Amino acid sequence: MDLSLVIPVYNEEESIQELTDWIVRVCSARIISFEIIFVDDGSSDSSWETIESNAEKNQMVKGIRFRRNYGKAAALHTGFSKATGEVVITMDSDLQDSPDEIPELLKMIRKDGYDLVSGWKKKRYDPFVKRITSKFYNRTARWSSGIELHDFNCGLKAYRLEVVKSIEIFGEMHRYIPMLAKEAGFRKIGEMVVEHRARKYGVTKYGLDRFIKGYLDLLTIGFISRFGKSPMHLFGSLGTMMFLIGFIMASYLGVRKLVFVSHHLRAPLVTNSPFFFIALTVMIIGSFLFLTGFLGELINRNSSERNSYLIKDKVNI
Ligand code: UDP
Ligand code: MG
């Protein structure tokens, strides 16, 4: 099969029929063999019934339905696990992404050798707040990951099958799939300007909290990719540094006291100096950080994934 389309659906009953027909039209015209995998993320409207009736008519339409709403990342992950096409394309089910982009995306993966191609909604039809925050996020994401993309969170993306089978997304991490792909060793990441359309039916499924969650997930990804395999490298060095700073302060107070005493002078009480309390606090925090590092290492030892590596090629094995 050439192509698997993975489409997360959450209460998009008005759009699904139109979207399905459009995709079938585009793919049939180009003789692309394809499957559409709808993942119904716990919709409470008639989205699932529409998917079912399409699946009855057309073998290429497939669907999975969650019992409740788990989020877009969960839906994508489940769709990815079922995908079998040589190329996997994700798109939103609200008709904001255009199926007309499919042939070009397919070409970029198959002919131009990209591992991942992200859509770039150069001209966006989103509310002002979202456009501004999105600019800020994309800039931060570019800076922290070194991946030159303008639109990390574009719902329209194409992947080589191996890429989606190699990454694991959860939480709200669908926003940072390019980072996860790069982290997994897929280097050829490109982008393509795509048409973005105003939402035709229904409403957006996200509120303002998406910005906070997105930001926290960015930190998590940065942390995991740098220190995930060896948390002690971060916590150990921070802990040691803090403990040493505290220790030097405390030693200074101790030595000063001894000097006073040895000269038979009236020494000020060690506890009168603010340094004493600062030293104490810093040493305690340092020890905790160190222990956190140890705990992280212990958890890693027990992880079933501690020795899972992605293999690219084999010879004589
Ligand atoms: N979506 C989902 N689960 C959710 C939220 C959204 O599957 O919990 C789907 C939704 O149906 C749509 C896509 O993710 O196909 C993008 O959502 P939306 O259009 O609301 O986001 P926006 O375009 O406002 O960024
Ligand atoms: Mg949308």
Image: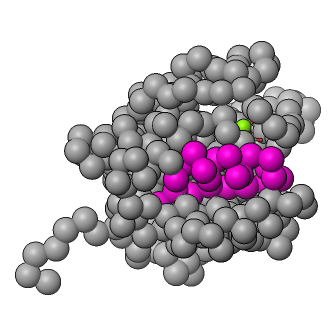
Here the colouring is one colour
Q: Eyeballing the image, is 279 above or below 23? A: above
User: In the drawing, does residue 65 fall left or right of residue 29?
Assistant: right
Is 222 in front, or is 134?
134
Is 138 in front, or is 8?
8
Rendered residue at 43%/70% (across/down):
84
Rendered residue at 72%/42% (across/down):
94
User: In the drawing, does residue 207 fall left or right of residue 131?
Assistant: right
How far across and how far down the image is residue 54, in percent? 67, 65
Total residue callouts:
0
Identify the image quadrant of residue 232.
bottom right
| Magenta part of the chain | 4-24
The C terminus is located in which quarter? Answer: bottom left
The N terminus is located in which quarter? Answer: bottom left
Q: Is residue 67 visible?
A: yes
Rendered residue at 30%/43% (across/down):
107
Q: Is residue 179 visible?
A: no
Q: Eyeballing the image, is 95 above or below 43? A: above
How far across and how far down the image is residue 204, in percent? 82, 38
Q: Does the segment drawn in magenta span residue 114?
A: no
Identify the image quadrant of residue 196.
top right
User: In the drawing, does residue 276 fall left or right of residue 272?
Assistant: left
How far across and how far down the image is residue 71, in percent? 75, 56
Is 303 in front, or is 79?
79
Rendered residue at 67%/39% (across/down):
95
Q: Eyeballing the image, is 186 above or below 261? A: below
Q: Does the segment drawn in magenta span residue 21?
A: yes
User: In the drawing, does residue 290 fall left or right of residue 200?
Assistant: left
